[in-house]
Amino acid sequence: MQRMEQLMELLRKYSGGGIALAFSGGVDSSFLLFSLKRLHDRKPFPLKAVMMQTVFQQEDEFSEARKTAAELGSTLEVLRCDPLSLPELRTNPPDRCYRCKRHIFGEFLKFCREHGIKTLMDGTNADDLQVYRPGRKALRELGVVSPLAELGFTKAEIRSLAAEHGLDFASKPSMPCLATRFEYGTELTPELLERTGQGETFIRKILPENTAVRLRVQGKIARIEVPPPAMGTILANREEIAAKLRKLNFEFITLDLEGFRSGCYDKKEEKTL
């Protein structure tokens, strides 16, 4: 059976009671929404795409997510919450993702109950099962269905299938929450998150489209992570970048010679959890 048909068959099994998709606008959830919409168009069923707006996301993520959902023929339901209202999240603990997802997906489940929807899905893929993702525990506890992971879809496979179907988001880089820009134990504030997001957005606009970039913050230091091929662009624009980041109250501006590294603050032993 072709991979797309495998996915459609699995989604069909859940469609009878209605499906709500936790949508981020990233490649995985966008591809899953595309697949759900195709299934819905064949035989309509209750389908909702729902996103949580928090201080942990950059502002342009919301407009891009709305645009993607609209291009896929879906209306995006946007909920709002403040993770920093939870004392246990303010110090960015190693299990922050678990605590945050317990809270956010709990709100999504309330949304499902209010709309008579039986199944809540997310875009976790098979690669996510191989690295440190404490939020996965929260999803399991809450009964969230992760069809891409269940069928073994890797990120590369999802990107390939999205490209085959002519979907613009196929090469979009990952955009994890802003809390990942800080070492565990850092006191998080809305102001710190906002200026970090502004700085990263500024750098992203200078780089070629779909280049991965992270602005890691350690005290007064702003550390730029990009893939090695993009380092020349950073250096060519170093004065402009440094001036912008200083305006955002970062004192020391550095370029990480090791390049872009997803999950750079995660300890090696934690990645087996």
Image: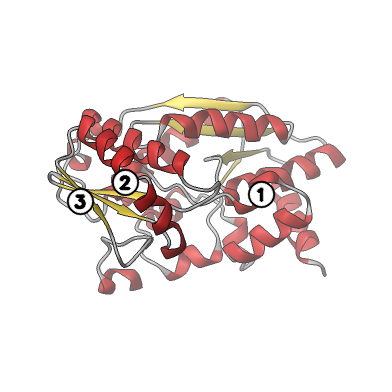
Q: Which residue is mark 2?
A: 238
Q: Is residue 199 left or right of residue 208?
A: left
Looking at the image, which is closer to me, 84 or 261?
261
Q: Mark 1 highlights which residue?
A: 31
Q: Which mark is residue 93?
A: 3
- Mark 1 surroundings within 10 Å by alpha-carbon count, few (fewer than 14), some (14 through 19), many (20 or more): many
Examine the image and state in which quarter residue 8 appears.
bottom right
Determine the CA span between mark 1 and mark 3: 31 Å
Mark 2 in CB contact with mark 1 (< 8 angstroms) = no
Is disc 2 in contact with disc 3, using a CB cutoff of under 8 Å? no
Q: Is residue 247 left or right of residue 22?
A: left
Q: Nearer the viewer, mark 2 or mark 3?
A: 2
Q: Quadrant of the C terminus?
A: bottom left
Query: x and y percent of residue 81 in the render?
Result: 36, 27
Q: Residue at x 68, y 38 (%)?
A: 18
SS for callout 1: helix
Element at label 3: loop
Q: Which amino acid type is shown beneath numbered disc 3?
A: Pro
Mark 2 or 1, nearer chain start: 1
- Quadrant position of residue 101: top left
Q: Amino acid at mark 1?
A: Phe
Judge by depth and name the residue closer to the eye, 139 or 220.
Answer: 220
Of the two numbered discs 1 and 3 in the rendering, the one whose residue sits closer to the viewer: 1
Q: Position of residue 191 (x, y in %)?
A: 22, 28
* 130 is higher (above) or lower (below) than 234: below
Instruction: Report x, y in % for residue 209.
Output: 55, 46
Hey, which quadrant is residue 115 in on the image?
A: top right
Cα–Cα gap, marks 2 and 3: 33 Å
Mark earlier in primary sequence (2, 3): 3
